[in-house]
Image (cartoon, rainbow, N blue to C red):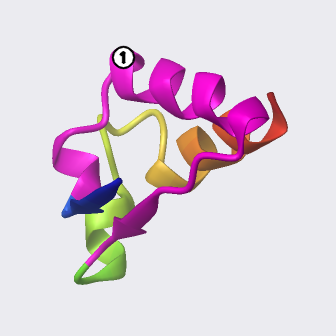
């Protein structure tokens, strides 16, 4: 998978998809243009979402 400007599309379904794909060794390339885009809804950052998906 390739997602550019991924925080725009980050929602619970994408988080679940990343978590499900991990045991199957599915890769995803997630791209940002600037670090400012890492802010999602103010309470969570894109980095936190990716870290949670990575640990599952």
- Residue drawn at (26%, 65%) of the image: 37
Q: How many marks?
A: 1
For label 1, the SS is helix
- State which quadrant residue 29 falls in: bottom left
Q: Is residue 26 above or below residue 23?
A: below
- State which quadrant residue 43 falls in: top left
Q: Which residue is mark 1?
A: 13
Q: Is residue 15 magenta?
A: yes
| In the image: residue 43, left or right of residue 53 | left
| In the image: residue 34, left or right of residue 51 | left
The percent coordinates of residue 19 (x first, y second) are 63, 27
| In the image: residue 18, left or right of residue 46 | right
Q: Which residues are magenta?
A: 6-32
Who is closer to the viewer here, 26 or 12?
Answer: 26
- Residue drawn at (62%, 22%) of the image: 20
Label 1 crowd bin: few (<14), some (14–19), many (20+), radius 10 Å: few
The percent coordinates of residue 17 (x first, y second) are 47, 25
* Quadrant of the frame with the C terminus: top right
- Residue drawn at (20%, 39%) of the image: 9
């Amino acid at each position: 998978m390739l997602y550019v400007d991924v925080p725009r599309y980050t929602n619970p379904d994408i988080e679940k998809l990343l978590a499900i794909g991990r045991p199957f060794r599915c890769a995803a390339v997630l791209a940002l243009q600037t670090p400012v885009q890492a802010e999602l809804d103010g309470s969570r950052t894109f980095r936190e979402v990716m870290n949670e998906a990575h640990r599952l």
